[in-house]
Image: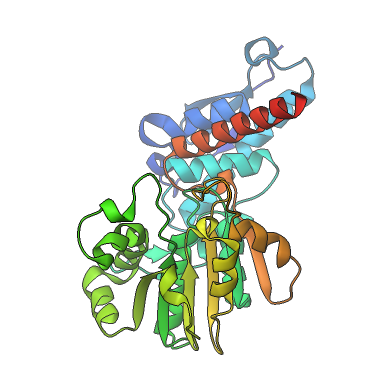
Amino acid sequence: MTEEFREFIVDETIDRSELFGTMDRNLTAIQEAAGVEIFQRDDKLLIRPLDSSDDGRGDGEASGHEAVELASGILNELIELIKLGEHIDQQKLSYIIQLKTKGVSYSESNVSKDIICFTAKGRPLKPKTIGQKNYVSGIRKRDIVFGIGPAGTGKTYLAVAMAVTALKNKQVEKIILTRPAVEAGERLGFLPGDLQDKVDPYLRPLYDALYDVLGRDAALRLKEKEVIEVVPLAYMRGRTLDNAFIILDEAQNTTKEQMKMFLTRMGFGSKIVVTGDITQIDLPKDKKSGLVEASKVLDGVKGIDFCYLKDVDVVRHELVKKIITAYDRYYAKEAKDDTVL
């Protein structure tokens, strides 16, 4: 038997269009995630669990009660964010649902209160997930931080934002952004132009992040003054960098020799952030990734922090998260099959 409806009162000060979503999209997502039906009645919502025959659950009051509790909990989380002036987009809603399903509260984690800086357009830039918040906290507390995780988790963007903030607060005197220029399917020699023209495509994501945070004109002015450097990793050899915020992006494509070379460039008053995705290594098969080796060699070294972001921390289109999960499952199955053979 289906349980009686539970009433959920919605305060009249809450923007219902924000809470319910366009064409009630938010309510539909909550119903599907929790296994409930939600109906609107005046100033309240009526929530009841689906029949066990409808949702595939076994019989028993506990499952129905838990479903209603989950739906109510998600709604309360959304209301708290709306009170803080937050916009509920699909990515944020999906993340809140995932957390609540695991018994974790998004609002209690204070993720949305941690403003790093404001972009060139005046938009507050802050972590969007608990994983991102821990990553930003690690950068604040440690001199060397490794941000390891899949595409779309904000590893590079947040590191650039933290670098710009440190520069504005006069904690450092310059920002250095670097990447290994690995030939991923197209040889450098085949590309048109001089050396700078050849390596610029590899550095484009770093430029994009800078332009968004600082604005294109301000970023270019600082680059002309050499307050900001955007260079391929090969240019780092032989340098000692004091009072600088240094970001190594796409570090999974460094060799172990390059990684050691880069980390030993660090001077006094400097901070290093290394970002990479160990599932997307473009090195030749006979070359070991410097990022993979560093995660083993430096694990437990005081003053160095490793932050592992996961697919739940992806802040791009919802399909990106599904793509990453699908690939992870496929590779895990492939590895298992190879072991059996």
User: Quadrant location of the N terminus?
Assistant: top right
Q: Residue at x 53, y 38 (%)?
A: 324
- In the displayed structure, would residue 205 be above or below residue 139? above
Horizontally, is 134 left or right of 318 in the view?
Answer: right
Viewer-side residue, 254 vs 272: 254
Colouring scheme applied when the structure was drawn: rainbow
Q: Is residue 235 visible?
A: yes
Of residues 42 and 170, the one nearer the viewer is 170
Which residue occupies 68% across, 32% down? 335
- x 48%, y 70%: residue: 247
For the image, the number of numbered tags is 0
* Residue in the foreground of this view, choosing between 91 and 81: 91
Residue 164 visible? The answer is no
State left or right for residue 151 relative to residue 202: right
Which image quadrant: the C terminus? top right
Q: Where residue 142 appears, x then y in whole percent?
A: 63, 76
* Residue 132 percent across, percent down from the top left: 55, 58
Q: Is residue 304 above or below residue 86?
A: below
- The picture places residue 231, in percent across and down from the top left corner, at 37, 71
Q: x, y (%) of residue 115?
A: 47, 68
Q: Would you place residue 318 above or below residue 77 in this image? A: above
Q: In this view, does 17 lie above or below 60?
A: below
